[in-house]
Image (spheres, rainbow, N blue to C red):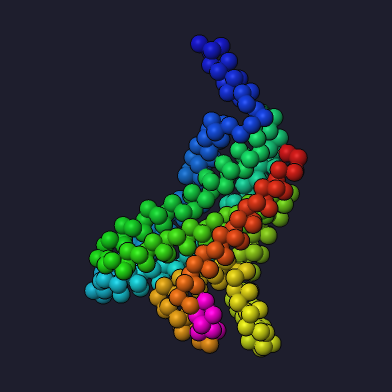
Amino acid sequence: MENKDGKSSEKFLTSNSNKFSFRRFSSLLIIDFKEVLYSRWFLFYFVFFGFVSVGLSWVGWREGIYGFSGVGKFLASFINISFLLVPAFSLLPSSLTISSARENLILEYVFSFPIKKIEFFLSKFISIFSGIILPPILILPLFFFILKYEKGDFLLFFKIAFFLILFSFVFVSLGLLISVVSRSRLRAVSLALFFLFFFTVFSEVGVLSFISLARVPNFAFILLIFLNPAETYRLAAISFFSQTLDVLGPFGLYIYYIFGEMMWILFALSLMLIGTTFFLLAFVLFSKQKP
């Protein structure tokens, strides 16, 4: 029996070693996804999302807020929290994925078997990406129904969830890119913290202040917004509550005047493009590296 199992395992590893094997990929994905589910960062992330959702829903129920106003305030608070939480939990775990495996010589061991790099890379990406989007996908609908949703609220929820998935996609891809180019975990974490600070704090406060003081042309201002995934996500979310972006002042009204009511589609395309660029660049660099 042992010989039979050994032969089947050997056959599994050696069959179609030069081609993408869905069987090998699914096996790697199951292992990586279990590792994510059992990790401490995922547990903290899941509990924190649950705690925030319970807290916001309780406030809405305590104050007698129902319908669109209740769901709207719940999602507005959730957006402000996810603006920092999602990039942090997307960047840090993904930035350590490949860099840690390289530093601990795990890559050499893994690729001593006939495993394709695309199988390994996709497995790492999908497992972390699934771990990031799983808590809001599981938790938010529950408290969405608690607040007695209406038809308009239902569409609003799916728009927010869609942009949250795109937002996670961008930063998980960026984290993998950081992990690929980093030779050590320390460097990976340093770069992840730098980009986290740059996209969520510096770009919003420093760059926008510079634009206002230096009187940069409006088209340059819009370009910088579309190049910043965090700001793009925030503007898209704000547009669901303030369609004309008038809460942002003249710049918000200018963006609405240029792009109109369908600007959220452009925001979505921008996030898709940036995320895909990071993802492809990370994979190309990883495929050219030696284990």
Q: Give how far across and how far down residue 49 sits, in percent.
A: 42, 59
Q: Is residue 10 above or below residue 182?
A: above
Q: Nearer the viewer, residue 160 or 151?
A: 151
Q: Give how far across and how far down residue 155 sits, in percent.
A: 35, 65
Q: Is residue 254 magenta?
A: yes
The answer to whether residue 201 is seen in the rendering is: no
Residue 164 shown left or right of residue 206 in the figure: left
Q: Give how far across and how far down residue 235 sits, in percent.
A: 50, 73
Q: Which quarter of the figure is the C terminus placed in? A: top right
**Residue in view at x 53 percent, y 46 percent:** 126
**Residue in view at x 50 percent, y 42 percent:** 33
**Residue in view at x 59 percent, y 73 percent:** 225
Residue 114 picture quarter? top right
Residue 59 shown left or right of residue 251 in the figure: left
The answer to whether residue 32 is seen in the rendering is: yes
Q: Give how far across and how far down residue 135 sits, in percent.
A: 42, 54
Q: Is residue 225 magenta?
A: no
Give, as a single range, the part of the protein colored magenta. Answer: 251-259
Residue 18 shown left or right of residue 169 in the figure: right
Residue 229 picture quarter? bottom right
